[in-house]
Amino acid sequence: MADLKTEAIRNVVLLSHNGAGKTSLSEAMLFNAGVVTRLGTVEDGNTTSDYEPEEIKRQSSIQCAILPWRQHDIKVNTIDTPGYADFIGEVLTALRVADGAVITVCAASGVEVGTELMWRLVQERSMPALIVVNKMDRENADFLSCMEEIQTKLDKKCVPIQLPIGSQSDFQGIINLIARKAEKAAQESEMPPSLKEQAEEAREKLVERIAETDDDLTTKYLEGEEITEEELAMGLKKATISGAIAPVITTSAAQNLGVKQLMEAICQYLPSPKDVPQEKAINSLTQEKELITLDGDAPLATLVFKTTADPYVGKLSYFRVYSNTLYSDSHIWNVNKNQAERLGQLFIPRGKSQEPTPQVIAGDIGAVAKLAETGTGDTLSHKDHPLMLDPIEFPYPPYTVAVYPKTKADVDKMGAALARLCEEDPCMQVRREQDTNETIMAAMGDSHVEVTIEKLRRKFSVDVRVDVPKVPYKETISVSAKAEYKHKKQTGGHGQYGHVFLELTPLPRGAGFEFIKKVVGGAIPKNYIPAVEKGVLDALKEGVVVGYSVVDMRVTLYDGSYHTVDSSDNSFRIAGAHALRKGVGQAQPILLEPIMLIRVTVPESYTGDIIGDMNSKRAKVLGMVPQNGFTTVEAEAPLAEILRYATDLRSLTQGRGTYTMEFVHYAEVPTHIAQRVIGEAQKAQEKD
């Protein structure tokens, strides 16, 4: 569509709890629009949006997919998203560039945990939404019961604009309440007599609700005048875009019933980029905010919202143009990285395929390959007027695993492969834990980890195994002590001689390590003192009790002796290390554990369960903050007790809770627990 205008674009995100039928809906829409010639199914693994092997295997989406189709003169970019909580980052990615939402509810299962979460995310963004009661052909499908749940658990503003004709195996089509027509297999007919009374009652409620949102319609309604079909449709569009009404539609994606009417509703009631409030961007030259406009001569602002990494194709960057037009084979400026980029051929993405395009206009979504510096969340603009859009805010990944390569070949490739996957998935982080010598991968949950491991194997031929991360305990001393060590060795020719006296003093938590030199009278020559310090540091890293590094201690070198021939740097280094180990053993060493600040947000009804669980985890509850039906519980808890809190929280709250945690300080491990930890560490050392 060469003459595509911004006002003829709809950017729509499909949201739901896992298994409510988003992918089947998107496939039916593509089929009805003539984009695909046969209707793929999730079960057969041949849908346009679920094309990754991991998705086909699980019969579930794990990433968002861009699926454009056209109806009349309107282009709709539908973005199919995962419904499983572990892949919430993909949902946030899609929400950032969408102007409207379609929230799918299973007619048999009703409003589930994921439905409530998606509704909350949409409302937080004041995004217009349609609700789709899907799977009306399923056993136990019940539209009225589902509608009651929607209005109770989501909002009273969710109002049906259709009624189903039949249900389960008898589902035949829908009644359009505004037009007062039955539509079966896209053929209009009169309403079935058995549903006429129910339909008229539902229509009256709809008319009243629409009239409440418009002063002119309110006047007509109160004066008993007939509101025309066109006025109702226009009033419903305004009310939907303003968020006053969320129209409810009913479909069976598997039977392709009601889907064409859904497509009409998307085009008619959801907003174009011109119908929503325009964003503000920061001019990186002036550091002032500017309102983005959709005028043809406005400064360019393009947000990269998704990146995929492929070892063969390379990097593919998905973007939305917010103002001006982006052209193929042009030069662009990455505002975040302060780097120039060369754009090659632009594409219109559709699932795993891409259609070349010379340009992408304001409001539309496109893709480009092989950008050198650009990552997810970066803004592409022009250097002479660089505008930076707000990036996407991704959640903290709370679920951690230690990652180990299976073979020597995997050792060499693992780091680079993990870095590529982190670039593709901002909800995944990888770091090296120096204290335990482990590679730690942080993700959103166990399924997220499983998918990542499969991608490592498939995309980069890297095999890894994962385990629960070790807790980075530390050692320290509880009392002062003095220690002496003389390293003396005669081996023919030059021998070895180093003799030191150390005083060890405990320091406050978090103070670290101090080395003090108080040698007088030349007992140890100055040139050997750095070697003593190196030896002390060597012993600190290796630990004394069970190999954890020693912290929060002052070591004072106050005396010693040397030999004019046999003394050397290495001799004093050895002496320093041995003296330190001896001193720590005499200074009543204790074990320290990392304490994390954890913030758990749950519906109010779960607050008691969370606090009880926290108490069982040796946590210290600091406070509670209630807000909008939710409570955030703040506590300090030992890392050892909450390594798998993601799983515990999901079980406690049926998936309704979220949390973040961050390191705050180290604290002494209770004696009875320290004995167990030391025993387990000693067994592990013996095994190794």
Image (cartoon, grey):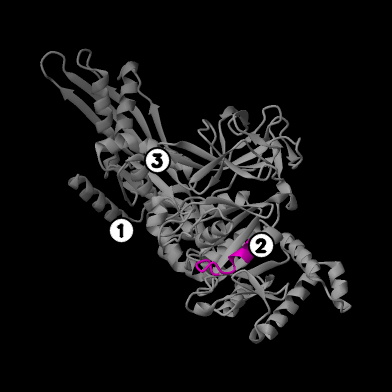
- Does 362 sit above or below residue 167? above
Instruction: Write down the region rendered in magenta.
Output: 252-265
**Circle nearer the N terminus (2, 1):** 2
The magenta stretch spans residue 596: no
Q: Is residue 297 above or below residue 250?
A: above
* SS class, disc 1: helix
Circle 2 SS class? helix
* Badge 2 density bin: few <14, some 14–19, many ≥20, Cα 10 Å: few
Label 2 amino acid? Glu
Identify which amino acid the numbered label 3 is placed on.
Leu
Give whichever of discs 2 and 3 has the lower sequence position: 2
Left or right relative to 214: residue 284: left
Q: Which mark is residue 418?
A: 3
| Vertical position of residue 223 compared to residue 624: above or below | below
Q: Which residue is mark 1?
A: 672
Residue 263 is covered by the magenta coloring: yes
